[in-house]
Image: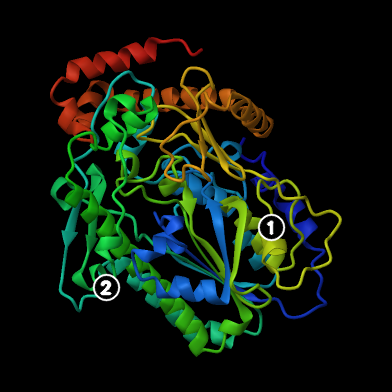
Amino acid sequence: MCGGGPAGPGGLALLLLAAGRLAAAGPPRPSVVLVACDSFDGRLTFYPGNQTVALPFINFMKKYGTIFLNAYTNSPICCPSRAAMWSGLFPHLTESWNNFKGLDPGYVTWMDLMQKHGYHTQKYGKLDYISGHHSVSNRVEAWTRDVDFLLRQEGRPTVNLTGSKTRMRVMEADWQNTDKAVNWIKEEAINFTQPFVLYLGLNLPHPYPSPSTGENFGSSTFLTSPYWLEKVTYEAIKIPKWSSLLEMHPVDYYSSYTKNCTGEFTKQEVRNIRAFYYAMCAETDAMLGEIISALRDTGLLKRTVIIFTADHGELAMEHRQFYKMSMYEGSSHVPLLVMGPGIKQQQQISNVVSLVDIYPTMLDIARIPVLQNLSGYSLMPLLLEVAENEVSSRRPRPPWVLSEFHGCNVNSSTYMLRTDKWKYITYSDGHSVLPQLFDLSADPDELKNVAMKFPVVAHSLDKILHSIVNYPKVSSSVQEYNKRQFINWKQSLGQNYSNVIANLRWHQDWLKEPKKYEDAIDKWLSQKQH
């Protein structure tokens, strides 16, 4: 559907024409700073999560702005999630299927439109929303999800303490990008007569690649220094309850297995992984603080809207998994805080919102007419201290959000619909894998699947989901895409493809019985699509 979406290449002239009605009158438009980090569990930004680690600048934003208590990613993995945020469109509309397949060139981002309408623009750090990036491992793992085999993709998740109690800067690349953003604010932005929009993308608190296995073998080391670890209250760390392997949902079992989490872990191992992760979140918070401080020192804070969010969360050993790629809260729930001129202070919003809402919100802030065919809805009506006169054309916000996943570590396309207290998760065609239903008010840890207990609720949520996306059809088209891509890749390597796979992340398992796995791939390739 590339080019077919509202912000596709063909729609550019139309968009700019629509946006040309920008009103010149009224008060000056505010500047905007968006800080988007990676793998930050949104629940940490409010009680009870924030009892485990000191996050002073997130707390500052809560005090002087608004926090969203139920903000979600539209896909719990880096590239498709960021593609949704930058395009304002659900992943199935842009066909952002995995970490290799994001936005195709030509999509008009909110930053493109803001630049066209007089905003100075600057971006630093991690963008990761365009197709063509990430390792070969990541692609092959995503493409072969339908093959009937189980392969561990890397070593067990571990922790690593580095430096001394004085070492603040652990993630050097993020700090360098933060420094660039701070310098830009102090040296460039302070002199602008027109408003600006600044984007800072951080890698933290994403786990680091394990150096012992090389860059292609995955990111499984939670790394911090004693300085940040001291910010964590060990006694407050909750050890997640795990279902037995036999009781696990089949997709969860596949994920736990491929993430190498099905073995035995001591409580201390789990507590350490969680503690080191929280310490990495504290370091992320400090970078946000550098940006807030720079705006305050230059006098720009009072006329700048600051947004803090993340592409997805981190399970940190909940549900016997780490990483993301799951619709459980730790993985799909993201932080979203907003502060600035006109934004209500100390406000907590319980409405369900998601990252596709960033696009129309940015246009709203810049007073550019919001496009009607985006997947998201502006957050401004929820944020404003003084309610604006509602424009009759503004679409009412629906009482649900959608998240979907089609990448590695999960052997089925996954769809999540979150409403007031319900979370409905369905897989593939909706029939071949059992759906899940969680009552988050009664079961916040998502340990009891009540889909069989409340069939009417499950059916009604499935009906809503079908009205948003024909998910069996999307699942089928992703399966076809995966097979096609794998065949192209295999053909490009000739008979050597098995040797290449033997050096990817799942090499340890593949090398034990390569013929068995080659046969499984051949069988998969010979099967007709349903």
Q: Which quadrant, please, contains the N terminus?
A: top right
Q: What is the total number of numbered labels drawn onto the structure image?
A: 2
Residue 469 at least partly seen: no
Q: Secondary structure at mark 2?
A: loop
Residue 148 occupies quadrant? top left
Question: Between 100 and 65, which is closer to the camera in this rendering?
Answer: 65
| Residue furthest right as drawn | 392
Is 112 left, or right, of 499 in this rendering?
right
Q: Position of residue 513 (x, y in %)?
A: 15, 19
Q: Position of residue 398 (x, y in %)?
A: 70, 46
* Looking at the image, residue 147 lies above or below residue 16: above
Please tell me which residue lies in front, 237 or 497: 237
Rounded to the nearest angstrom, the CA distance separating label 2 from label 1 is 36 Å
Residue at left offset 36%, top offset 71%: 54
Residue 485: quarter of image: top left
Residue at the spot of label 1 = 378
Q: Which residue: 44% across, 40% down?
A: 446
Numbered label attached to residue 169: 2
As shown in the figure, which amino acid type bears the numbered disc 1?
Ser
The residue under the point 13% across, 23% down is: 512
Q: Secondary structure at mark 1?
A: loop
Residue 193 left/right relative to 257: right
Circles 2, 1 touching at the beta carbon (< 8 Å): no
> Which of these two is toward me, 317 or 450?
450
The type of residue carrying mark 2 is Arg
- Tell me, yes or no, if residue 342 can be seen here: yes
Residue 227 located left or right of residue 373: left
Q: Residues within 10 Å of mark 2 (few under 14, many from 20)?
A: some
Mark 1 Cα within 10 Å, few/some/many (few <14, many 20+)? many
Up/down of 500 relative to 280, above or below: above
